Amino acid sequence: MFGSMEKPIKQTGEIHKVIKYKSSPVAYGTGLVSLDIIVSSDPEVPCYNWAGGTCGNVLTILNYLGWKSYPIARLNGDAASIRVKADMERWGVDLNFAEQSPTTNTPIITQENITNKQGKPVHKFHWKNCPKCGAWLPNYKAVTLAATKMIKDEIASGTLFFFDRTSPGAIDLAKHFKSLGAIIFFEPSAKPDVKHLKQALELADIVKYSNEKFLSSLTDIKGFTSAFLEIQTLGNKGLRYRTHSSNNLNRKWKKMPAFQTSAFKDACGCGDWTSAGLISKLCNRKAINLMDTSEDIVIEAIRYGQALAAWNCGFEGARGGMYQVSESTFKKDIQQIIKIGIIRKKNRTKRLETEIINSEFCLCNNH
């Protein structure tokens, strides 16, 4: 399932780690890596905690799909980061670059699942205060330029670079991976600085964003559509996309409706699954070859990502399904969605007890 990495090359007086790969496609990413606390709409179901955040989810899902993933983050030794690292390692994610200096406390996001007045499942996020003691929780902090300089010296290849937050460090890494021939995937998940946004869009081979959250910001930037593939998500209506192999800005949008969902429970994480599925099918090649990709392959990759998103709707939490079904069941479910548009029957297993949060345990560093 996972790729192999060569051992560090020993040089006189030091060990200089040059990362090279032999088999599986390799994804690096930086951005939001958080601890997600999932509060079920069912009061009989305990709270669970998993690694989350857009970047954290996409990289973890990619590993689940057979890639090798490396988050570039500033995780320290606080309670939240310990849980995040343990969960990512469970799925084979490599944490070689996840503790960049200066390390910092890990963001914690509580996802509360409820049933609205119309009887439909919805969720809301709490990210400012500790769910146990009420203390103020840490914000996201980007990897520094000092850290990226050392990282660039260690990484000599890569298939894809993913980022969902803009910062000087993220832009620096995107430029480095661009120079290595990697595909650059930019998915803004927070309102970016205009200067950094322009730089990110100039570097990106694929841009994916929500029409509700980021359309107004992006349309103010002239020429941002130079990316090979631009995807605009439309919620439960699906998405629309456009591709090009030149600087022609008069491209037409093409819509792709979402798959049906059976036993809908939660839409959280569907965008992350769409991105990871698309990447797994489309981005296992050099960026220079992306422009020659046929539209049929692009459509197949998008539909695969949408099938993963539809499957994810049957579970609470952004990656809840990964803990409840076997890999073989997952693959059968996805094949069924792609073939007939919906899952007719599901087989479920129980979550592990080790993923349950102790109700007396405080995740922030104030206790």
Image: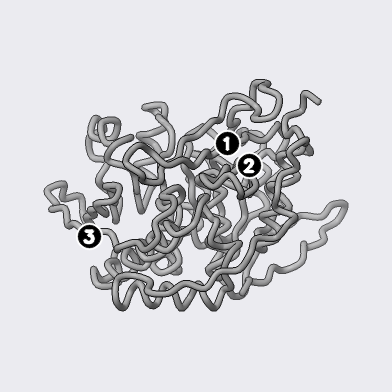
Q: Which mark is residue 109?
A: 1
Name the residue tied to disc 3.
256
Asked if marks 3 and 1 touch (Cβ < 8 Å), the reply is no
Give the x, y percent position of residue 249. 16, 46
The quadrant the C terminus occupies is top right
Name the residue tied to disc 2.
35
Give the x, y percent position of residue 353. 73, 57
**Label 3 element class:** strand
**Label 2 element class:** strand
Identity of the residue drawn at 31% across and 66% down: 303
Identity of the residue drawn at 36% across and 63% down: 262
The quadrant the N terminus occupies is bottom right
At label 1, which amino acid type do we have?
Ile
As measured in the structure, the alpha-carbon distance from the residue carrying label 2 to the one carrying label 3 is 32 Å
Earlier-in-chain disc, 1 versus 2: 2
Q: Quadrant of residue 23?
A: bottom right
Instruction: Classify 272 as above or below 289.
Output: above
At label 3, which amino acid type do we have?
Met
